[in-house]
Image: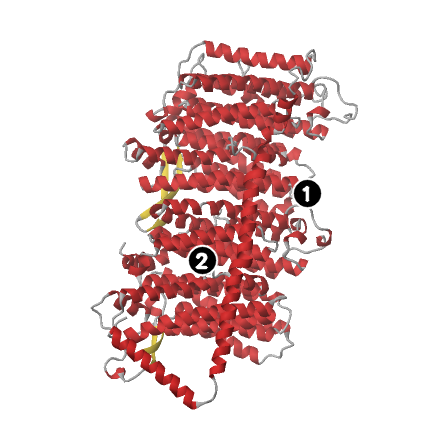
Amino acid sequence: MDLSYVLTLLVFFPVLGMVVLAFIPNTQEKTIKLVGFLATLPTLLLSLAVYFHYLAGKSLEDFSVMKHWIQFGGFGEMDKNFFAVHYELGLDGFSMIMVLLTSIIATLAAVASIHIKKEWKGYFMLFLLLEVGMLGVFAAENLILFFIFFEITLIPMFFLIGKWGYFEKERAAYSFLIYNGLGSAVLLIVIMVLFARTGTSNIDVLAQIVNNPDQQMMAPISDTMKFGLLFALLVAFGVKLPIFPLHTWMLRVHVQAPPSIVMLHSGILLKIGAFGLIRFGMGIFPEQFKTLGLLLAILGVINLLYGAFLAFVQKDFKMVLAYSSISHMGIVLIGLGAMNEAGIQGAIFQVVSHGLISALLFFLVSVFYERTDTTLLENLGGIAKGMPIAAGFLLAGAMASLGLPGMSGFVSEFMAFLGLFEEMPWVAAVGAIGIIMTAVYLLRAVLGITFGKSHREFTGITDLRKVEWVPVITLMALIVLIGVYPSVLSEPLKTTLDAIMLGLGG
Amino acid sequence: MENAWIIPLFPLLSFLFLLLFGKRFKESSAYVGMLLTFASLVYSLLVLFERFSSPTYKQEGVWLTIGDVQLTAGFEVNQLNALMLVIVSLVSFLVHTYSKGYMHGEERFPVFYAYLGLFTFAMLGLVLSPNLLQTYFFWELVGVGSFLLIGFYFYKDEAKAAAKKAFIMTRIGDVGLLIGMILLFWQVGSFEYDAIFAAVAAGEVAQGMITLTAILIFIGAVGKSGQFPLHTWLPDAMEGPTPVSALIHAATMVAAGVYLVAALFPLFTASDVALTTIAVIGAITAIFAASIGLVQTDIKRVLAYSTVSQLGYMMLALGSAGYVAGVFHLMTHAFFKALLFLAAGSVIHAVHTQNIEEMGGLWKKLRVTGPLFLIGTLAISGVPLFSGFFSKDEILIAAWEGGHPILFLLAVIAAFFTAFYMFRLFFMVFTGKSRSEMKNVHESPSLMTLPMIVLAVLAVVSGYVNTPWFGTFLGDWLVEGNEALGHGHVEGPAWIMIVATVVSLAGIYLSWLIYGKKSLSRNWLGAQTLYKVLYNKYYIDEFYSMTIVKVTKGFSHFLRYIDTYLVEGIVLGVTAFVQTLGRLGAKLQTGQVQTYSAVAFIGLAILMVIFALTGGYL
């Protein structure tokens, strides 16, 4: 059976939703919201199908697709693949997980978009375009295609923040664009150098020939150059992750963008940084990457502690969560810095786990903001009285975030630290302070919102509505599933990890 | 025993069921919880009896694969686990029953029972764990159960603060445990208790590493068991409903630290430094908490400090290589302390205050609670023939034989203090004049008194499973087949038992003189400063908030300045740079073709020079 059309369909289905939306009058709020939500479903179903196809023991290569696209120069006569850019999509265990995560969170974010107040049509069209970009990033098999999808995510994101955000939305949008624009400029340089030197942009092929000097290449790449390229990648994806001190733009996005968009931003877009570092940094330059272990681990500990201490003194709950994201991305770096199986597996787990947890927390932010019109901690308190269920889920989300066993956060944090303690016990021991601080700042914020004296004006508020149950239950179920039965993630990741470890020579 | 894994699942079911459907059942939720914990209790008893006649049973499966390493999960029934299963499920069932009366009329009644279920599940899971990772897993979950129940009255600011404090203080300890366990893993290559003991016994782990990991793991126990200096959360945890204090903060969870040390005993005995650390911390905690208990006026806080002190006792026993003594006292303490808390709850239920200064003369009004409280008091004071007497005697013998005369002395003084403050409590609450404002004092319903009666019986008889007079069944059984745990019973000098008796009776007598007969003035020592220091718990909370809390806050604010000014400043710099670049670029667009081609030519020339110099190889 030929399944090569599946990925194209999966990635581009939201475009069909955009077309349908284009024909609906702007005033039909309900229809637009429904169509917007429905347009995310086929992608979700297809990615679930891909996952079950994999679970059934079949190969993910069934889904690979390659079509000749652009040819540069006259090299085509020598070798069809030389200086050619193909349209090629494919999946391995890691990218399959990311595609699945993206489609789940996109659907749930579409549900969360019921709280959007204006110009639904434009919102959902941009939303769907954003989803196409994110899916493409993970499914792209070559760097140029990756870059195109990467850029596709920037533009809708810019408008979504700038138009549907809060008070300082324009500033946040520009800040987002400048930073990510600079990041992608650096990324483009890396891609172009690699393409010019090797004549290919296919990720797997690059991983092979960059590390084997005997392989055919237009021009050899010196080790110094490799270091330079890797460093450029670190900057490009470091902006996205974000690595301290490149983080300030994402604080504004977290606070100013509408929560449904932050679900995607914090849940998926930040993860492209980690994905890129693992896929390209580790994949293409393993020799050089190995030497960065200590640097990454230290950067990770800085991220972890810096984010945690700052989250402790924030006044706005959204800022707490923003710094918490910085802190939690530190764990990704810690895991990568360990350079062993436990660490890298922990890093990937953290990517998925934090995606789910931050999506849950930001969904709850939108739920609370709907009813109280504030996210300032001093204006909140005692919410558990009026909304016990939402407050309970908020507390559970915080517990997941601070790494309570039985939830996904624990598995990733545990593995990352397990890995780092083998290689650099002292760095890890300093990082362990972060485990305490995470509990400190999360409890301060979450108990500040839910516990204590109830504010008078919150007495008449309603608890979760039916439609709001869907994202909350889905995300919580996934968080607990990974926490209790981590093999759902570790099994698909096995081949990817083996390949990475082989490259690292371990 | 093959099906022992089902024991924790009953309360888990109770938790999930009540969370989902509790609202519909209202106060009948209690029956769901009681029924399911009763099932756990029956099953635990069956497992215990089966364990008497058959060997340790263990079963595991793969939980997570990391490269070549397989992390497992499963369950194990050895002597210690089987005993703990019964203690936990019994106390939990009794507390479930008692709460039906105590929590009557509470709006969030089903939620309370759901949380009780969650806690019981985690605690039972903890005692069945065959490896450190799984222990840690449930270790954290019992912490959450405790956190939720301390913060049960979430709208009270004190409850909120106490819940937060409990979680954070224990988490500090937990990080120690986590680090210790990971370091040990990289030495041994496994989290399995068996593998760890085998590696330690075979000398595969360096001595320094054993000491380090053992002490780190002990830090986890310090946090959970409220040992000095991480004890401050436990007295504050009394903000939770009283049945919770009985279950979690007296009988089960706080004993988890002691259980952990006992479960890892062969690791600790491999390092003298680690053992001494445990003994010293235990002795300090025992005397220190007992001295605070002398002057507190809140009935629950006196009991809380007494718990801290008694846990210190158990640690002292384990640190003096008295495995049996520690575990024995863990068991008897679970019974008499749970009894005392439930009886205290019954008193509070009747008089609606926790301040013992406002109580008095309740003996005649609470005809059931009074005698039961007295039994508990006699047991904890170490009066002969009650359970506490036998277990405390074992501990004193262990401390003496362990070769630490100073620690032994501290333990004796702590025993004197214990007898004194417990009877101070008893006399102030039950004897003397009754207050006029307390007219409508009723005895609690039988739903509350029955569990207390069961515990009172156990507080009397549970000591007889291990006595120097009638045989040391418990001790012999506990160490059976495991050399590393030491001897079942250590023969000690007979005078120790006499000293213990005299000391405890002296404490009671002094207490009677002051609070019963009132022939001695209450400040007969005239030490007002000392009283103030003790009443303010040695100002430890104040010390922490002046130092650690302040430093953390200060550092965070410092970082905030860095973030707002330095990092943001760099950002503004970058923005300005980009803008300038843009403006310069705009200026270049002059529209003059000559300039364009000149720039292009110069650029090409530079590139060619570079190319020529490097030979195309960069």
Q: Is residue B542 visible?
A: yes
Mark toward the viewer: 1 or 2: 2
Location of residue B100 in the rendering, given as x and y in whole percent from the top left corner: 64, 35
Mark 2, secondary structure of its residue: helix
Label 1 to label 2: alpha-carbon separation: 39 Å
Q: Amino acid at mark 1?
A: Glu
Q: Residues within 10 Å of mark 2 (few under 14, many from 20)?
A: many
Is residue A337 shown left or right of residue B506?
A: left
Examine the rendered structure and indicate whether residue A305 appears above or below residue A113.
above
Q: How is the image coloured?
A: secondary structure
Residue drawn at point x = 50 percent, y = 35 percent: B224
Mark 1 lies on residue: B107
Which image quarter is the C terminus of chain B in?
bottom left
Is residue B437 shown left or right of residue A469?
A: right
Residue drawn at point x = 30 percent, y = 60 percent: A288
Examine the rendered structure and indicate whether residue B557 appears above or below residue B472.
below
Residue B534, image quadrant: top right
Whether pointer 1 and pointer 2 mark residues with C-beta atoms closer than 8 Å, the reply is: no
Return the residue nearer the eye: B336 or A335: A335
Location of residue A15 in the rendering, given as x and y in whole percent from the top left corner: 49, 76
Residue positioned most to the left: A214
Mark 2 lies on residue: A352
Residue B400, image quadrant: top left
Examine the rendered structure and indicate whether residue A485 appears above or below residue A241.
above
Return the residue nearer the eye: A475 or A500: A500
Return the residue nearer the eye: B598 or B56: B598
Mark 1, secondary structure of its residue: loop
Return the residue nearer the eye: A181 or A355: A181
